[in-house]
Image (cartoon, grey):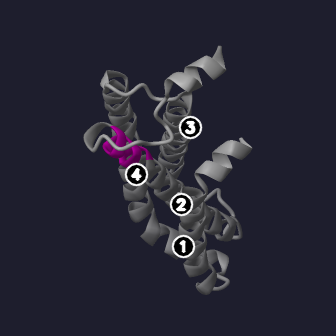
Amino acid sequence: MIDFLKSNKLALIGGVISTLFIGLGIFLLGNVSGYEAKQLLEGSVRGINMLCNTVVLATATILTLLLTLLGISSGSQSKLKADHYYQVLSIAKIDTVLFVSALILFQLFNIPLTESDNVPVSWYTAIYWATLLSSSIISGMLVTVILLLFSTVRNIIRIVGLGEDHPLISSDEDEDDEE
């Protein structure tokens, strides 16, 4: 886990900055009352549903593209180190968590809470803030996945396309060390 954090520091920082930037926008809205939160929630549900749909579509596409990336990786003339495959596995794990989270949030946002008379007005404030917080986290996670994917694709281009010497290329010495 520590190796993952060290090797993907920039992508993770990008995701955290995105989440914090969106969270700052939420914070600047200030405190809202239950009735005001209900009105704001009614207005933002359509946009949040669109965000969740987009994230679900993007993450499913990314998982498919990772399979293509694995095909290119295994078909390359250069033998790649296990680190490359662990990097792809890490992207797939984060992407899958993001996919499932966005799908669950999409289902939760489709519950017609604002039309129900059984929900106390005071709950709308908590629901509103939870909605905004979860959408900022999902956005930040998507930025992280995209940056991780970019890093992996950049490495493959350098190794396969440009034929550069790269730390992810396994050499005969590496294979002797593993034995």
Task: Name the N-terminal-most of marks 3 and 2.
Answer: 3
Q: Which residue is mark 1?
A: 22
| Residue 153, numbered label | none
Residue 106 lies, in percent from the top left, at 47, 48
Distance from Cα at disc 4 to Cα at disc 3? 13 Å
Mark 2 vs 1: CB contact within 8 A: yes
Quadrant (top left, top right, bottom left, bottom right) of the C terminus = top right
Indicate the secondary structure of the residue bearing disc 2.
Answer: helix
Mark 1 vs 3: CB contact within 8 A: no
Distance from Cα at disc 3 to Cα at disc 2? 16 Å
Dot 3 surroundings within 10 Å: few (below 14), some, or many (20 or more)? some
As for residue 178 lying within the magenta part, the answer is no
| Residue 150, numbered label | 4
- Using the image as rendered, state which of residue 156 and residue 105 is in the foreground: 156
Task: Name the N-terminal-most of marks 1 and 4.
Answer: 1
The residue at 53%/38% (across/down) is 87
Residue at the far left: name it.
161
176 relative to 38, above or below = above
Residue type at mark 4: give it. Answer: Phe
Q: Which residue is mark 2?
A: 140
Distance from Cα at disc 1 to Cα at disc 3? 25 Å
Distance from Cα at disc 1 to Cα at disc 4? 22 Å
Residue type at mark 1: give it. Answer: Ile
Q: Which residue is mark 3?
A: 90
